[in-house]
Image (cartoon, rainbow, N blue to C red):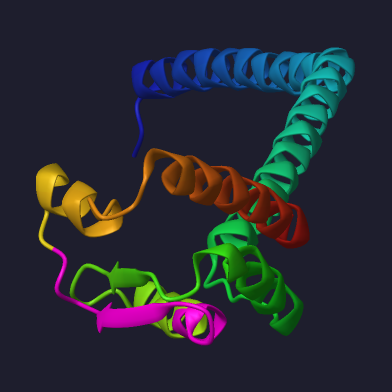
Amino acid sequence: MVSPEEIGSANRALHWIGVAKSWAFALVAIGVVLEFLTDRMERPHNRTLENARQEELARLQNSTALAQAETARVLAAIADRELTIEQQASIRDAMQPFAGQTVILRSYPSEPESARLILQLKAAFSPPLEVIDETGQLEGTWAKFRHAVWNPCYTRRSRSTIRRKARSNIARYRQAIY
C-alpha cells in the first residue's frame, strides 16, 4: 500500500510538473508570437535587399552583354582579312609608275593570314612589278625586314611615292574593313 507521505510527495511533484508545463507552454506561445512578429518586421527589409540584388544582377548582365558585343566586334575586326578585287585593282593602278621594279614579299612562318595576303598582293603587283615570293621566310630581325622592303635600287622619289600610295591604299583598306 502507498503511504500518505508518498502520496503527498507525488502531489507536490505533479504540481511543480504542471507549473513547469504551464511555463513551457507560455514560453512556446511567446516564441511563436515573437517568430511571427519578427517575420512580419523583416519582410520589407528582405524585399529591399532582393530588389537591390535584382538591380545589381540586371546591371551586371547588361555589362556582360556590352562586353560580349565589344569582344565580337573586335574579333570581327581582327579576323582573317582579304583584299577585294577592287582593292587589288587599286593597288595595281598605284604601282604602274614602278613597272619593272622588283618587290620581295615575305612573311613569318606559320602565319596563314599573312601567306594568304601575300598571294593577294602578288596577284595585285604581278603585271607591273616583278614579285619575289618568300612566304614564310621572314626572320625576326628589323634589319633584314627593312632591307627586304626598301631595296637600295629605289630612288628617294620612288620610295616616298610608294609610301604615300601605300598609306592611302591602307587607309582605304581599313575603311572597307571597319
* Residue 123 higher or lower than 28, as above or below: below
Where residue 124 sits, quadrant-wise, is: bottom right
Which residue shows up at 78% across the image and 40% down it? 62
Determine whether, in the image, residue 141 is placed left or right of residue 175. left
Q: Can residue 141 be seen in this view?
A: no
Q: In which quarter of the image is the N terminus?
A: top left
Determine whether, in the image, residue 68 is placed left or right of residue 134. right
Q: Give the range drawn in magenta.
A: 122-138
Which residue shows up at 71% across the image and 61% down it? 177
* Residue 31 higher or lower than 85, as above or below: above
Q: Quadrant of the C terminus?
A: bottom right
Q: Closest to the observer: 136 or 43?
A: 136
Q: Where is residue 129 in the image (x, y as percent from the top left)?
A: 45, 77
Q: Position of residue 93 (x, y in %)?
A: 68, 71
Where residue 4 sits, quadrant-wise, is: top left
Where residue 45 sits, quadrant-wise, is: top right
Q: Position of residue 83 (x, y in %)?
A: 62, 75
Q: Position of residue 64 (x, y in %)?
A: 67, 44
